Image: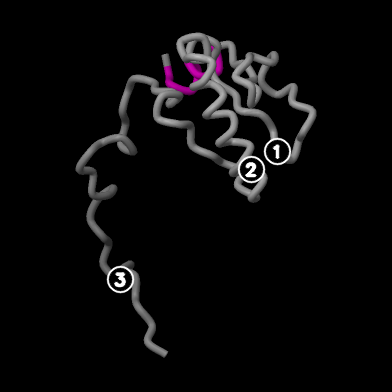
Amino acid sequence: MGELKKWRDQKWVRIGTDGKVKGECGTSKDKKNPDRCLPAAKANSLSKKQRSSTAKKKKREGSRGKTVVKNTKAAEVKFGGGGLARRKNHKGCGAVMDGRRKKTLYI
């Protein structure tokens, strides 16, 4: 099963800044600065204080105009797998083709 399918098949819930589960993800009234969403299993595994912390971080950064805000360390959502993007020493997708190198312009 692909990673995206695993992600999509989970039940995601919305977390309020008070640390409580507020309902399903995507039901936030504030569309410009929405609440934090987490998989229900992950949300239930966190303490109320940890849920509150990650939700407050999302609201704080969102009020500054950020649209993508990383979870706190405790609230990180990890999926198995790997792929090229997760390989530790991955240097790129292959050799550079002749005539296709980037050129630096000095003005």
- Mark nearest the camera among 3 and 1 is 1
The image quarter in which residue 35 lies: top right
- Report the disc number at residue 22: none
Magenta stretch bounds: 2-10
Is label 3 in a helix, a strand or a loop?
loop
The residue shown at (69%, 14%) is 23
How far apart are the alpha carbons under marks 3 and 1?
A: 46 Å
Front in this rendered view, residue 100 or 89: 89
Amino acid type of the residue tagged 1 in the rendering: Asn
Residue 83 located within the stretch drawn in magenta: no
Please name the residue that numbered disc 3 is placed on.
99
The residue shown at (65%, 23%) is 16
Please name the residue that numbered disc 1 is placed on.
33
Label 1 environment density (alpha carbons within 10 Å; few <14, some 14–19, many ≥20) = some
- What is the chief secondary structure element of the magenta stretch? helix
Say which label, 3 or 1, has the lower sequence index: 1
Q: Report x, y in % for residue 9.
A: 55, 12
Amino acid type of the residue tagged 2 in the rendering: Gly
Say which label, 1 or 2, has the lower sequence index: 1
Label 2 environment density (alpha carbons within 10 Å; few <14, some 14–19, many ≥20) = some
Q: Are marks 1 and 2 in contact (CB under 8 Å)?
A: yes
- Report the disc number at residue 62: 2
Front in this rendered view, residue 107 or 73: 73
Q: Report x, y in % for residue 25.
A: 66, 20
Quarter occupied by the C terminus:
bottom left
The residue shown at (40%, 30%) is 73
How far apart are the alpha carbons under marks 3 and 2?
A: 43 Å
How far apart are the alpha carbons under marks 1 and 2?
A: 5 Å
